[in-house]
Image (cartoon, rainbow, N blue to C red):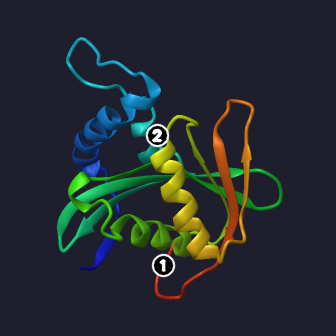
Amino acid sequence: MQIDVIPAALDDKPVLANLMQLYLYDFSEFAGWTINRHGLYDYRYLDHYWTEPDRYPFLLQVAGELAGFALVRSLDEGDEPVYHVAEFFIMRTFRRTGHGEASARQLFYRFPGQWSISQLERNEAAQRFWRAVIGRYTGETYTERIDERGHRIQEFVATPDERVRRKA
């Protein structure tokens, strides 16, 4: 089955916000987050993905069905931007099916250049996922380090794919 990585329009924000609740619930195991008095998790940066030019929200679909989302940021860290996966979520139904890797590859092709992807030290499943995906994508030509917060970070260069167009 094909996965589509679709730029999320402003009208898609409620859909992404709903998926964000599932993601934050899963992620709370590692980050220790709690819900607010309304029974929801707070994600203070969501609105920024439609108001700041260096943030890119995406919905992920498998055969037209919602499968997750990705939030990508670009930061100026020298001469060229460095792309970061701020958040990445594949619904459990679609995990371990290759759809997460296919989504990540589409993001890499969409934003060629330097990438830096980080995971919490306690989130070993995410570390395994990203090492495998990045390793296959780069032919194991990436570096890994631990930052001052104790996060694992993989750094690599993505190459363009003419079939995928970057959001302007």
**Amino acid beneath label 1:** Arg
- In the image, residue 117 sits, relative to residue 44, either above or below, namely below
**Amino acid beneath label 2:** His
Write down the quadrant of residue 157 in the picture: bottom right
Q: Which residue is mark 2?
A: 48
Front position in the image: 130 or 22: 130
Q: Residues within 10 Å of mark 1 (few under 14, many from 20)?
A: few
Q: Which residue is mark 1?
A: 165
Q: Is 131 on the left-hand or right-hand side of 14? A: right
Disc 2 secondary structure class: helix
Residue 80 image offset from top left, x and y in percent = 76, 62
Q: Residues within 10 Å of mark 2 (few under 14, many from 20)?
A: few
Question: Along the polypeptide, which appears first: circle 2 or circle 1?
Answer: 2
Disc 1 secondary structure class: loop
Residue 63 image offset from top left, x and y in percent = 18, 74
Which residue in the rendered view is the most extreme toward the top?
A: 37
Residue 162 image offset from top left, x and y in percent = 53, 88
